Image (cartoon, rainbow, N blue to C red):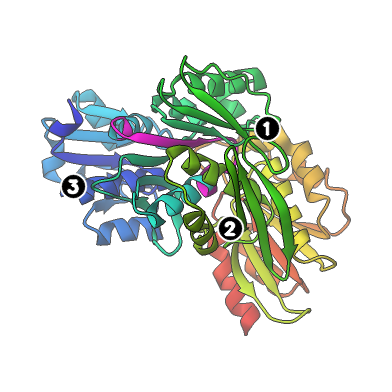
């Protein structure tokens, strides 16, 4: 079935952030959309309000009648949904058109000039930055993002006239191999998802294959210092970026007074005085990635670069301030999606730079049993840099438990004596009675849902 023959779309795992962007895309086309997810969330409630028929029952009784007709029905699924899911099994057994989310995204964006942002970390922030820059200019873009962009309250941008699309290129399950980049960006290649890849070599090979998929008239933009060995097609032009070196880099960096300003150096000159709307140090690298990609489209002007980066609103759960009391002794609560040791290290370093000399408490919820098993020593080493550590139970997501793998294998390795291991249910009561100054909650699980409850109690 060609995509233009699609009459209705069913999503198995509609509450996933990437799935939700596709659901919104098909709703924008006026097509009927339905889907299943295991639990209700703010995102599924929004999709229901926008017209999608969302169910939380793993049963065919919950599937609307019109979606049981194979003719014209596209079924989109994510690997997070188990093979035993009843509707998904029904669709497969009845020979429906059943496709992975990544394949559908690749088909939708294939006819456009896609800016595809990949990497172990930084994908969501850099892609949303680039989308905001393009959207702020006269050309615009279509964007399928891996997070809710504040100010837009959506992970989807649409333009009827723009030739550009912005895509978060996810390496999990080799999903990014379904894309055809015009500009491929590689932010980082620190090993991750070893449950899929097994070794660092296989992980790097997957990124190398990603670079083979770039259009012959396209570009590769890669961070300096990576182990990646690209295999780009003939005709593809390669550029580098990095804070202090590369074809795109920062100069004259000024940090202080709650602001970060730098000059953006590109191959043909300099754009002075780029001020970050979200002033954390890692966003210097993120801004170089986003601005570099947009510069390669030929649409970036100095005025657009300055205004768009200054007005960039940030993404939910990416270094998001939930409480910021005034004064040198005011409480601060920040939530960040960091779930890899390198991301966690950068997040802690950013808080230290913003609040030098203040006591930092880090509450960490590990994400996945396999990632906890693979990186326990690294997590413990990074967390030992905090003044206090509160460790939460592992968030399993798509995984079944692994014998012997709990948060304790991280906890026992943390060198700080000021450490505590608690359940997620005890988080709010534990923290409201703790004399924290700066609290950083980190992880890709659901601890963030407890943060507003804690903040309400702290304010009282």
Q: Quadrant of residue 350?
A: bottom right
For marks 2 and 1 on the same chain, the one whose residue lies earlier in the sequence: 1
Of residues 22 and 378, the one drawn nearer to the viewer in this rendering: 22
Q: Is residue 57 above or below residue 246?
A: below
Q: Which mark is residue 137?
A: none
Q: Quadrant of the N terminus?
A: top left
Q: Is residue 123 above or below residue 181?
A: below
Q: Residues within 10 Å of mark 2 (few under 14, many from 20)?
A: many
Q: Nearer the viewer, mark 2 or mark 1?
A: 1
For disc 1, the marked residue is 224
For marks 2 and 3 on the same chain, the one whose residue lies earlier in the sequence: 3
The residue that appears at 23% across and 24% down in the rendered structure is: 93
Q: Is residue 72 visible?
A: yes
Of residues 292 and 230, the one drawn nearer to the viewer in this rendering: 292
Residue 428, given in percent of the width and then of the height, sits at: 63, 69
Q: Is residue 114 above or below residue 37?
A: above
Structural distance between the alpha carbons of marks 2 and 3: 35 Å
For disc 2, the marked residue is 447
For disc 3, the marked residue is 29
Q: Secondary structure at mark 1?
A: loop
Q: Secondary structure at mark 2?
A: helix
Structural distance between the alpha carbons of marks 1 and 3: 40 Å
The residue that appears at 45% across and 62% down in the rendered structure is: 150
Q: Nearer the viewer, mark 2 or mark 3?
A: 3
Q: Is residue 315 visible?
A: no
| Residue range of the region highlighted in magenta in the rendering | 109-125
Q: Is residue 109 above or below residue 386?
A: above
Residue 24, given in percent of the width and then of the height, sits at: 28, 50
Q: Residues within 10 Å of mark 3 (few under 14, many from 20)?
A: few
Q: Is residue 84 left or right of residue 308?
A: left
């Amino acid at each position: 079935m060609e995509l233009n023959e699609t009459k209705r779309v069913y999503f198995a795992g509609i509450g996933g952030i990437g799935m939700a962007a596709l659901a919104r895309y098909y709703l924008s086309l006026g097509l009927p959309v339905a889907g299943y997810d295991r639990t209700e969330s703010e995102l599924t409630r929004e999709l229901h309000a926008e017209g999608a028929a969302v169910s939380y029952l793993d049963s065919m009784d919950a599937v609307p009648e019109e979606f049981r007709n194979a003719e014209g029905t596209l079924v989109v699924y994510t690997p997070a949904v188990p093979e035993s899911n009843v509707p998904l099994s029904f669709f497969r057994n009845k020979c429906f058109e059943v496709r992975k989310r990544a394949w559908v995204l690749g088909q939708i964006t294939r006819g456009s000039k896609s800016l595809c942002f990949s990497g172990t970390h930084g994908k969501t922030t850099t892609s949303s930055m680039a989308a905001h820059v393009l959207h702020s200019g006269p050309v615009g873009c279509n964007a399928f993002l891996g997070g809710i962009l504040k100010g837009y309250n959506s992970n989807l941008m649409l333009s009827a006239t723009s030739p550009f699309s912005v895509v978060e290129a996810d390496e999990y399950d080799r999903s990014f191999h379904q894309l055809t980049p015009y500009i491929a960006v590689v932010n980082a290649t620190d090993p991750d998802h070893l449950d899929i890849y097994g070794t660092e070599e296989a992980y790097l090979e997957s990124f190398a294959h990603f670079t083979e998929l770039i259009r012959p008239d396209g570009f590769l933009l890669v961070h300096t210092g990576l182990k990646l060995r690209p295999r780009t097609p003939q005709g593809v032009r390669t550029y580098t970026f990095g804070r202090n070196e590369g074809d795109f880099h920062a100069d004259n960096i000024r940090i202080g007074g709650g602001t970060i300003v730098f000059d953006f150096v590109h191959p043909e000159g300099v754009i002075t005085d780029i001020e970050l709307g979200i002033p954390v140090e890692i966003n210097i690298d993120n801004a170089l990635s986003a601005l570099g990609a947009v510069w390669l489209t030929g649409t970036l002007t100095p005025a657009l670069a300055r205004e768009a980066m200054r007005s960039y609103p940030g993404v939910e759960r990416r270094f998001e301030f939930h409480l910021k009391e005034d004064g040198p002794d005011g409480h601060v609560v920040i939530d960040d999606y960091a779930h890899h040791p390198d991301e966690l290290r950068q997040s802690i370093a950013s808080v230290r730079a913003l609040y030098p000399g203040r006591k930092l408490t880090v509450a960490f919820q590990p994400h996945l049993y396999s990632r906890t098993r693979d990186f326990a020593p690294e997590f413990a080493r990074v967390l030992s840099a905090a003044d206090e550590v509160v460790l939460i139970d592992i968030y399993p997501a798509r995984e079944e438990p692994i014998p012997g793998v709990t948060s304790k294998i991280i906890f026992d390795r943390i060198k700080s004596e000021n450490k505590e291991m608690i359940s997620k249910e005890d988080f709010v009561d534990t923290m409201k009675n703790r004399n924290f100054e700066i609290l950083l909650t980190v992880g890709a699980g659901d601890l963030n849902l407890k943060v507003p409850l804690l903040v309400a109690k702290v304010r009282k």
